[in-house]
Image: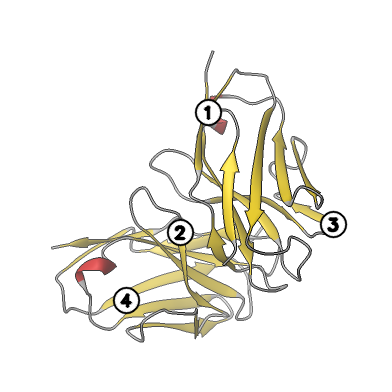
């Protein structure tokens, strides 16, 4: 089983600041990683797939990077609507999600 | 525009079988894509349950495999989840979702349905 560990568990930032979220896999997952955003009461929304490709309609301020076991989601300048919980997901071996990082307004 | 809608009972008794259906509208369930179930216990993270291709080929989370069956009914354009021997730990919002192609990234989700396991 591949375990994804996200850090930090929460992040307190102000609008306009840069957010850097980490996802570490227990073994190599190549670049088969996605990132999702989830707001309260809503289903997850796909942001990034294959580690660095933006999904349709996702703003350019969202970017992903990494390969192997270490991955990063960066939000270059936080907008008010970006405060949410973010999950990473791997599809190399079965499928699993990380525990999430909550991005809160400072 | 493909739309997914989950349906099923909101309350299930312990030891019973939970059955949910995901209706697919606005597109074909026989396309080149996976159809998946994901759940989220209250105030917790996401857990992949399993997914199915229109051919009937299914993959399951190893931790749930002994209790899960996912099936597809192309004539009704829907796929279903059965989870047997439920306990309070199975209380969660259950989402159905689909991928855009054969890569298991889920770009379209249903609204989710809350299932509570309680007597």
Disc 2: which residue: A44
**Quadrant into which the N terminus of chain B falls:** bottom right
Query: Which of the pair A11/B15 is nearer the observer?
Result: B15
Looking at the rendered structure, the secondary structure element under dot 1 is loop
Q: Is residue A63 left or right of residue A30?
A: left
x and y percent of residue A58 in the render?
41, 79
Query: Which of the pair A57/B38 is nearer the observer?
Result: A57
Q: Is residue B111 above or below residue B108?
A: above
Specify which label sits upstream in the sequence, 3 or 1: 1
Residue shown at 59% from the left, 24% from the top: B87
Residue shown at 50% from the left, 45% from the top: B112
From the viewer's perspective, is the residue at label 4 or at label 3 nearer? 3
x and y percent of residue A21 in the render?
36, 72
From the viewer's perspective, is the residue at label 1 or at label 2 nearer? 1
Q: Is residue B64 above or below residue A40?
A: above
Of all chains, the one bearing label 2 is A
Q: Is residue A98 left or right of residue B17?
A: left
Same chain for marks 4 and 3? no
Residue B8 seen: yes
Q: Are marks 1 and 2 in contact (CB under 8 Å)?
A: no
Disc 3: which residue: B57
Disc 1: which residue: B10
């Amino acid at each position: 089983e591949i375990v994804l560990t996200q850090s930090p568990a929460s992040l307190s930032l102000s609008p306009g600041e840069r957010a850097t979220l980490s996802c570490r896999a227990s073994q190599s997952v190549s670049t088969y990683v996605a990132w999702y955003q989830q707001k309260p009461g809503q289903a997850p929304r796909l942001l990034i797939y294959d580690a660095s490709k933006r999904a349709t309609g996702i703003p350019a301020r969202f970017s992903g990077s990494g390969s192997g076991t270490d991955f990063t989601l960066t939000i270059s300048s936080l907008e008010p609507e970006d405060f949410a919980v973010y999950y990473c997901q791997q599809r190399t071996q079965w499928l699993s999600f990380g525990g999430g990082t909550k991005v809160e307004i400072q | 525009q493909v739309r997914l809608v989950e349906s099923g009972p909101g309350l299930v008794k312990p030891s019973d079988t939970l059955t949910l259906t995901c209706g697919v509208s606005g597109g074909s369930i026989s396309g080149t894509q996976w159809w998946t179930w994901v759940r989220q216990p209250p105030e917790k993270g996401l857990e992949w349950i399993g997914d199915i291709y229109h051919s009937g080929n299914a993959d399951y989370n190893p931790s749930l495999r002994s209790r899960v069956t996912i099936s597809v009914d192309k004539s009704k354009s829907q796929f279903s989840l059965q989870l047997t021997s439920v306990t309070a730990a199975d209380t969660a919002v259950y989402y159905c979702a689909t991928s855009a192609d054969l890569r298991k990234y889920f770009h379209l989700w249903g609204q989710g349905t809350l299932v509570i396991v309680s007597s």
